[in-house]
Image: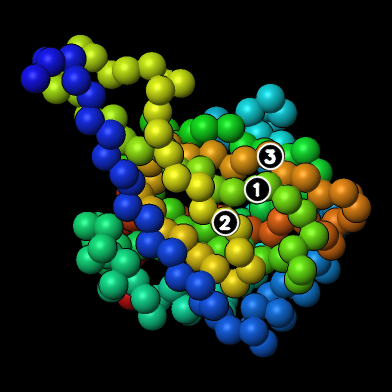
C-alpha cells in the first residue's frame, strides 16, 4: 500500500426528526418569526468579527428556547454514547441564526483558541414554514482525513462530505472539531418569515473563571 494513502472517515452525526412535535415546534417557529427587528445582528465568526465573505446571516444571542434545552436533556445520554463524549456538568450556549436569500457560512470548525477547551458538543435545531419556502441551506459535514503518512494531509478540494437537509423540527448533534458549512440559501420571496431558522449551540464545560461559583447540576 502507498504510504501516502489518505483514509476518509465519515464524521458521526446524530440526527433526530420530529424532535419537539408539531405543536411545540410550531410555537417555537412563531417565536423565531416574531424576533425580527433590532435584536437581530449580523452573524460573527469565532474571533467576534463580521466577515461577510465567510459568513452571511443574522443572529440573536438572547433568544429563549427552554423547551428545546429540556428535550436535548432527554436524549443526551444516547447522543453522548453515540458520539463518544461526556457532557456531565456542561452548560448550554446558543443563539437563533437566520439565513435568507444568498446567505451562507463557509467551511469552519466550532473550535478556536478561546473556545476549544469548552465546547464539547454542537447541536443545530431547524425551523421553517411549510412547504419549505427556500432552497439550499444544507448542513455539509466533511469527512475526516487520516493520513497514513504524517506529513500528508491531502488537498481541501479533495475532501468528501455528506449533506444534511435543514428539515423543520429536526436536530443534529456532532463534535465541534468536525469541519462543516451551511450551503447557500435561495429564498425567492426574500421575506423574513420565509427564512431558514436554526437554533445553533453547544454544550460547554464550565468557564474556569467561574469555577469557584459552580454547583452540581
Residue 32 visible here: no
Residue position for label 2: 165
Chain-order first, disc 1 or disc 3: 1
For this orientation, the residue located farthest to the front is 1
Residue position for label 3: 184
Residue depicted at x 74% and y 63%: 132
Quadrant housing the N terminus: top left
Q: Nearer the viewer, residue 186 or 169?
A: 186
Residue depicted at x 78% and y 38%: 102
Q: CA distance from mark 3 to mark 2?
A: 12 Å
Left or right of 34? Residue 215 is: left
Q: CA distance from mark 2 to mark 1?
A: 8 Å
Left or right of 174? Residue 71 is: right
Labels 1 & 3 near each other (Cβ < 8 A)? yes
Left or right of 185? Residue 207 is: left
* Mark 3 residue element: loop
Relative vertical location of residue 156 with respect to residue 45 in this rendering, above or below: above
* Mark 2 residue element: loop
Residue depicted at x 14% and y 22%: 148
Amino acid at each position: 500500500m502507498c504510504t501516502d494513502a489518505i483514509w476518509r472517515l465519515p464524521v458521526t452525526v446524530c440526527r433526530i426528526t420530529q424532535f419537539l412535535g408539531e405543536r411545540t415546534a410550531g410555537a417555537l417557529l412563531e417565536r423565531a418569526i416574531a424576533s425580527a427587528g433590532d435584536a437581530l445582528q449580523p452573524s460573527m465568526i469565532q474571533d467576534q468579527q463580521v466577515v461577510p465573505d465567510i459568513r452571511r446571516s443574522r443572529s440573536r444571542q438572547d433568544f429563549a428556547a427552554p423547551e428545546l434545552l429540556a428535550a436535548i436533556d432527554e436524549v443526551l445520554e444516547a447522543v453522548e454514547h453515540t458520539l463518544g463524549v461526556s457532557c456531565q456538568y456542561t452548560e448550554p450556549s446558543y443563539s437563533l441564526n437566520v439565513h435568507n436569500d444568498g446567505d451562507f457560512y463557509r467551511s469552519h470548525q466550532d473550535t478556536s483558541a478561546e473556545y476549544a477547551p469548552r465546547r464539547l458538543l454542537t447541536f443545530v435545531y431547524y425551523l421553517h414554514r411549510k412547504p419549505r419556502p427556500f432552497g439550499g441551506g444544507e448542513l455539509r459535514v466533511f469527512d475526516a482525513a487520516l493520513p497514513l503518512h504524517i506529513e500528508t494531509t491531502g488537498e481541501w478540494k479533495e475532501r468528501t462530505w455528506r449533506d444534511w437537509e435543514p428539515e423543520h423540527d429536526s436536530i443534529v448533534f456532532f463534535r465541534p472539531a468536525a469541519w462543516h458549512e451551511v450551503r447557500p440559501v435561495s429564498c425567492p420571496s426574500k421575506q423574513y418569515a420565509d427564512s431558514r431558522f436554526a437554533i445553533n449551540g453547544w454544550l460547554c464545560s464550565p468557564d474556569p473563571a467561574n469555577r469557584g461559583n459552580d454547583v452540581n447540576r
